[in-house]
Amino acid sequence: MRVAIIHHWFVTQGGGERVAECIASLFPEAPIYTLVAEPAGIPTGLRDRELHTTFLQKLPLASRFHRHALPLYPAATESLDLRGYNLILSSDSGPVKGVRIDPGAIHICYCHSPMRYLYDGYDAYRAQMNGLTRAIFSSIAGRIRSWDTGASERVTHFIANSNYVADRIRRFYGRESTVIYPPIDVHRAQLWSTPGDHYLCAGRLVGYKRTDLLIEACMRLGRTLRIIGSGPELEALKRAAAATPHLITFLGGTSTDTLWHEYARCRALLFAADEDFGMVPLEAQACGRPVIAYGKGGSLETVRGTGPSPTGIFYDEQTVESIMDGILRFEVAQQSGYFRSAAIQQWANTFAVSVFLRSYRDFVLNKVPAAATAMAEYLPQ
């Protein structure tokens, strides 16, 4: 049984890279393939592994501007020749489901999402582009979308990271999938008996996260907000918050330890994105902190807004007014003892790394019993 693992790219470390790292831990001898890699984007557990990249790696600034290489994705993916392997395990929110494999080989794709900018997010992404970039993107998107749809047929079995993504796989690829939620490092969690009065926002500062709405809502309400993360929106967000430096604090990119410390100290996490899954809300909940989230997408699966043990509050629209309403409703509920830190943490623990590893291992063994010969003898810790 020859096994290969492929992940779309290792440029920054996020949820997708953590999934790839966990999958690789189950198959310690399997080589890793990717389109392009940056040393800082390779998870610690993969830095000593055999790693193969494509011709994109040789292009100037390839890792920094990898998304601009969209026209080259099909050629780069198909240049990764995985013929000779019996089992291919991919972690993908890009094009690598289309990698070349032998007839009869099994390809299990853990799909974080079909490429949003080619499907239901096409209009939103296109609207954010400048004239030349928009024209180029518009001229090639249909061709890449057609290739990607065809590439999905090369996958033997799909795993989706949420029911939300499973629905998108069904709509765009016409395929069914099994949902296995991504792993959360709950062992890093801290619990503070008396958290602070400030709110927290964490994650990459890109347009669809709508951090701008969170800033404006806190400025209008006079609430303190601490922001962790970096990205292309950083300078614009700083300008938007410049009038209220006493309310809005930008912490930039932080260490993992600092991030989890900030989770534990906040009054609640603010979350405005329509995410496919979203690990950040669960990381905050692992520290016993509630979440005020936009009620759409993966948040509906990671945050409990009702029931005997609620873990957060939902607001209905991606608008400043709706977020303000959510914050005010949260504060009333919190003062009445609506949230219990222990119950919030208990909920987050159901998404632990160990749960993911067992579920993923069992899925693979159910589909490919012979894969047991290539698996780690014990589940990694």
Image (tube, rainbow, N blue to C red):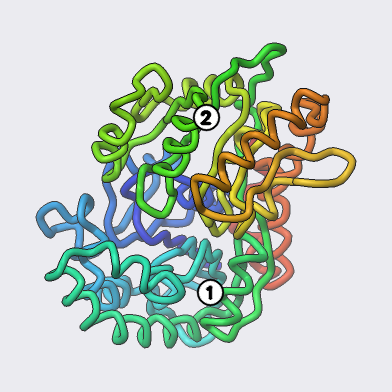
Q: Quadrant of the N terminus?
A: bottom right
Which residue is pictured at 43% across the width and 48% down the height? 210
Q: Position of residue 17 (x, y in %)?
A: 45, 49
Residue marked by disc 2: 221
Q: Residues within 10 Å of mark 2 (few under 14, many from 20)?
A: few
Residue type, numbered disc 2: Leu
Residue 88 appears at what percent x and percent y?
50, 69
Query: Is 138 left or right of 104, judged from the image as shown?
Result: left
- The local secondary structure at tag 2 comes to helix
Q: Which mark is residue 107?
A: 1
Position of residue 88 relative to residue 39, above or below, is below
* Residue 327 seen from this side: yes
The spot of residue 63 in percent (x, y) is 23, 52
Q: Nearer the viewer, residue 317 or 96?
A: 317
In the rendered structure, which disc, 2 or 1, sits on the residue that comes first in sequence?
A: 1
Closest to the camera, between mark 2 and mark 1, is 2
Q: Secondary structure at mark 1?
A: strand
State which quadrant residue 263 falls in.
top right
Can residue 364 be seen here? The reply is no
Q: Amino acid at mark 1?
A: His
Of the pair 277 and 320, the residue shown nearer to us: 320
Distance between mark 2 and mark 1 Cα atoms:
51 Å
Q: Which of 366 and 369 lies nearest the eye of the viewer?
A: 366
- Residue at screen point 67% across, 15% down: 192
Mark 1 surroundings: few (<14), some (14-19) or many (≥20) residues within 10 A = many
Instruction: Please tell me which residue is depicted at 24% across the width and 59% down the height of the picture.
Output: 66
Which quadrant of the rendered structure holds the C terminus? top right
Label 1 near label 2: C-beta < 8 Å? Answer: no
